[in-house]
Amino acid sequence: MNTVKTGYVRPLDLRKGRVDLGFGAGGRAMAQLISELFLRAFANDWLARGDDGAVLPAPAAGERLVMATDAHVVSPLFFPGGDIGSLSVHGTVNDLAVMGARPLYLAASFILEEGYALADLARIVESMASAARAAGVAVVTGDTKVVEQGKGDGVFITTTGVGALPAGRDPGGARARPGDVVLVSGRIGDHGMAIMAQRESLAFDSEIVSDSAALHGLVEALYAAVPAEAVRVLRDPTRGGLATTLNEIAAQSGVGMELDEAEIPVSAQVQAACELLGLDPLYVANEGKLVVLCAPEHAGAALAALRAHPLGTEAARIGCATADPQHFVQLRTGLGGRRMVDWIAGEQLPRIC
């Protein structure tokens, strides 16, 4: 992001102004947008240099670098519990966190549509900056492009994150073993249903609010409570929900999964919305939930650590990994039967993250 002085006498009209093509042309208008909006919101020494990248200090001795990237195209851009700005921070911070890493830095790329209101863009950027500060990460470099009106959808954001992985931590999708316990940090489906309820103008006794949140504090609490080697797998069940995440892990590790339907936490509002729309909450996206596969002898301590953290108060033990050469994920239903929980087919909920 460039910090060149623009020479403009008149500041950006962040109340009534609109994005125009000049904001992506690389000239004075773009420099003004960056200086008066992005640099002001994300202020830090690395970004203030105005270079094409950021030279960052190395992590502590013995730590390894972890990198993750995520694109965000959610519609609508604002929803109960968040917006595309905070979501773009949480999504990439969580990708680092489930690798066991401490998130450190973010890069951000914005694709803006000509004509988009600067007031709404400023609201998104401020939300993003607030989420980054709360997560303890700095946005150290970035890029902005503008597309013609009708060829975008307001704002798209891609964030790339860098984190430090402490020695001894090595969670991964291929590390689950038969007998490992499956934990989830709270109620599933809140994010996807918050988006769909707003799109479809569904009204409930209480509003469905997205669970969008940064999970690295919850992960640190888990590692503080149990040995690092006991934490086999960490995942955030986003697109495709809990069901798809567990199928991915089962395939990577060569195990099966057996879940108990009665133990999987789902709010009454989400359950009702899913029934109304013909959806299964197991496949609905989350943006602030953690799935843990843990060695069975440490499962009690892991569950207690999750429940002691503000983001894990409703954590539950929902099943276990099994020795199954077919790598099936199965659900024990409330009626005492079993059903397959297969991979999702197609896109159940488009544009939810």
Image: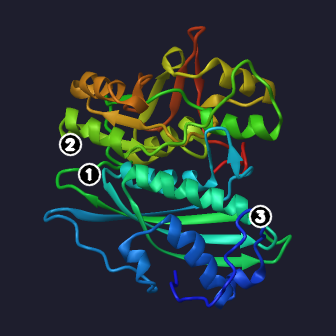
Kindly report which numbered mark, 1 or 3, lies closer to the viewer in this rendering: 3
Q: CA distance from mark 2 to mark 3?
A: 47 Å
Residues packed near mark 2 inside 10 Å, few (<14), some (14 to 19) or many (20 plus): some
Residue 63 location (% of width, % of height): 20, 62
Kindly report which numbered mark, 2 or 3, lies closer to the viewer in this rendering: 3
Say which mark, if any, is on residue 117. Answer: 3
> Quick check: can you spot residue 257?
yes
> Quick check: can you spot residue 321?
no
Amino acid at dot 1: Asp
CB under 8 Å between discs 1 and 2: yes
Q: Secondary structure at mark 3?
A: loop
Quarter-wise, where is residue 222 in the image? top left
Most foreground residue, 317 or 130: 130
Residue 18 location (% of width, % of height): 78, 70
Residue position marked by numbered label 2 in the rendering: 228
Residue 193 location (% of width, % of height): 68, 34
Residues packed near mark 3 inside 10 Å, few (<14), some (14 to 19) or many (20 plus): some
Say which mark, if any, is on residue 259. Answer: none
Q: Secondary structure at mark 1?
A: loop
CB under 8 Å between discs 1 and 3: no
